[in-house]
Amino acid sequence: MSTRTAHRPIGATMIDPSLGLPTITMAAPMPGFPAHREFVLVRLNDDGLLYAFTSVEDPELRFLVAPPEPFFPDYAPEIDNDVFAALNTKDPDRLLLLTVITAGVNETTANLLAPIVVDRDSMRAVQVVLSGSGMPVRAVMNRSY
Amino acid sequence: MLVLTRRAGESVMIGNDVIITVLEARGDVIRLGIQAPRDVQVHREEVYRELQSVNREAASPTDDVVEAVAKMIQPAETPDHPADHPGNEG
């Protein structure tokens, strides 16, 4: 019987906080969080509708994020070429769009002005400001979808 | 605050790689062109401040809040999918 030992380079262990998830690197930090450059995406429900965008450096820091399509079907932001360049995007179809959710006592809102765009190949991400789009920073989320 | 006077077409450099050019001045509206490396994000100040505040507000919700959101976005009453279940013989 042969056994296989999973060797993990020490460097990889230090970057990846045992969650075993691929690390996403911010091409530019999120406004308000200049020191946090590395995140992992932790799935929170079976449907893949809710994730925690969790800081590797500080697992206490997490953002609730969701793919916007189910909640805002008409939301189809245009992504600039600058963003492709910042993310080293080769195939725009590999981009994942996530909206940041602010969960409040009375209402839960989604930031449609500044979605997080993740390139699933380069594993780079950036919070893109859709300048001039007139999109709301706090769009109320409800279950009527 | 450093104060400089520039005419349209003239620029200011910040550090080694950020160049801000005055494109046009018309009354109290000034159009600027900004060249910066990709990892330097450029935002209108008020937009940046708003994002900063909504990001801080969104950051690190408690487990209770996360659970509430998860429940809220749970698709309401998915209709049965008879095809998914093997039908009774008959």
Image: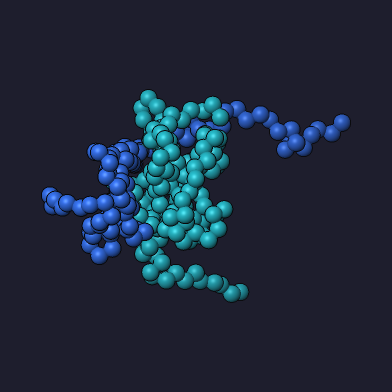
Chain colours: A cyan, B blue
Residue A31 sits above or below residue A16 on the image: above
Instruction: Check the picture and name the quadrant holding the C terminus of chain B.
Output: top right
**Residue displayed at 22% across by 52% down:** B7
Which residue, as the protein is rendered here, is positioned at the far right? Answer: B90
Point out residue A98 in the picture as x, y percentages from the top left corner. 47, 44
**Residue displayed at 30% across by 50% down:** B23
Point out residue A111 in the picture as x, y percentages from the top left corner. 41, 37
Point out residue A59 in the picture as x, y percentages from the top left corner. 34, 50
Q: Nearer the viewer, residue A70 or A55?
A: A70
Q: Nearer the viewer, residue B46 or A42?
A: B46
Which residue, as the protein is rendered here, is positioned at the far bottom? Answer: A2
What number of labels is visible?
Answer: 0
Q: Nearer the viewer, residue A24 or B7?
A: B7
Q: Nearer the viewer, residue A23 or B40?
A: B40
Q: Quadrant of residue A87?
A: bottom left
Residue A118 sits above or below residue A49 on the image: below
Q: In this orientation, does residue B69 appear?
A: yes
Q: In this orientation, does residue B66 appear?
A: no
**Residue displayed at 74% across by 33% down:** B82
Point out residue A4 in the picture as x, y percentages from the top left corner. 54, 72
**Residue displayed at 35% across by 55% down:** A28
